[in-house]
Amino acid sequence: MFRTLFPGDFFSDLNRLQRQLLRFSGDTGSIRGFGRSGFPPLNVGTTPDSVEIFAFAPGLDPASIDLSIERGLLSLSGERRNELPPEEGKSAIHINERFSGNYRRVVSLSDDIDPETASASYKDGVLHVQVKRRAAAVPRRIDIR
Amino acid sequence: MSETTQTTDRAEAPVLQPPVDVFEDDYGITLYADMPGVPKEKLHVRIDAEALAIEGEIDFPTIEGLEASHVEVQSPRFQRAFTLGKELDGEKAQAEFKNGVLKLRIPKLEQAKPRKIEVRID
């Protein structure tokens, strides 16, 4: 019945978005930690005063990573170059598993984050983004006169 | 160069298999492996006889009170092994490691390199 309230393919769009936002690798084959869930793989965690995002993106030039926060969505995009020799060369390619091409990942952040506080660093091929959460609103006592 | 899988099943936590690119030219083999988060001190590359083993451990920063809410990289350990052909010279292998990418170059033995044979016309 809800479907009729929304015209078009709203739900399938929503589902697709959701899959793109956060895809849990729920299968037990965790040995293939870098499955097809997308590049770069992400680990996200929270502390009482920040949200921490780790993107496992080796071999990038940090300056080429396009990172932004817009309306509570953190997005991460760019291009990863292929290091394989050109096809017409004399080299034979035996294994080609590493990701190359354009990538884009989007993470939905909690409502209490303050985008102005976002900071990012790149070390050993891992991009670490930290966004502070707003101090929990202190309950305010209202006097009754 | 071919892959050996039996070395990956240790009883403990699962390991990550780093994705690799491998290509070969007349003078040797080049391997790239993605091992993000591994510092240089925790990367181990071993070549003995005809086997290549790559291992590394991710160094996660410790952040107080961190609770994971979404996890795609589920293990801190990378491990993968390959068998090398007889024609490769493991002793002359060279490794570079930068931004989480390992580049390994293993040259071929002198006698395995292609030789151009001049054809003389008398």
Image: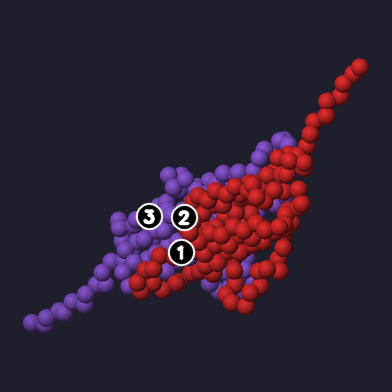
Chain colours: A purple, B red
Q: Chain of mark 1?
A: B
Q: Residues within 10 Å of mark 1 (few under 14, many from 20)?
A: some
Can you give x and y, in whole percent of width and height, for residue B26 in the image? 73, 39
- For mark 3, name the chain: A
Q: Amino acid at mark 3?
A: Ala
Write down the residue under mark 3: A120
Residue A8 visible to the viewer: no
Q: Is disc 3 surrounded by few (<14), some (14 to 19) or many (20+) residues within 10 Å? A: some
Which residue is painted at 56% across and 60% down in the image?
A: B44
Residue holding disc 1: B59
Q: Are marks 1 and 3 in contact (CB under 8 Å)?
A: no
Residue closest to the eye, B20 or A78:
B20
Q: Which residue is mark 2?
A: A124
Q: Is residue A4 above or below residue B86?
A: below
**Relative side of A30 to A116, left or right:** right
> Where is residue B28 shown, x and y percent of the image?
70, 43
Q: Which residue: 63% across, 74% down?
A: B10
Q: Secondary structure at mark 1?
A: loop
| Residue at the limit of the structure toward the top, as seen here | B122
Secondary element under disc 3, as helix, strand or loop, is strand
Residue furthest toward the right?
A: B122
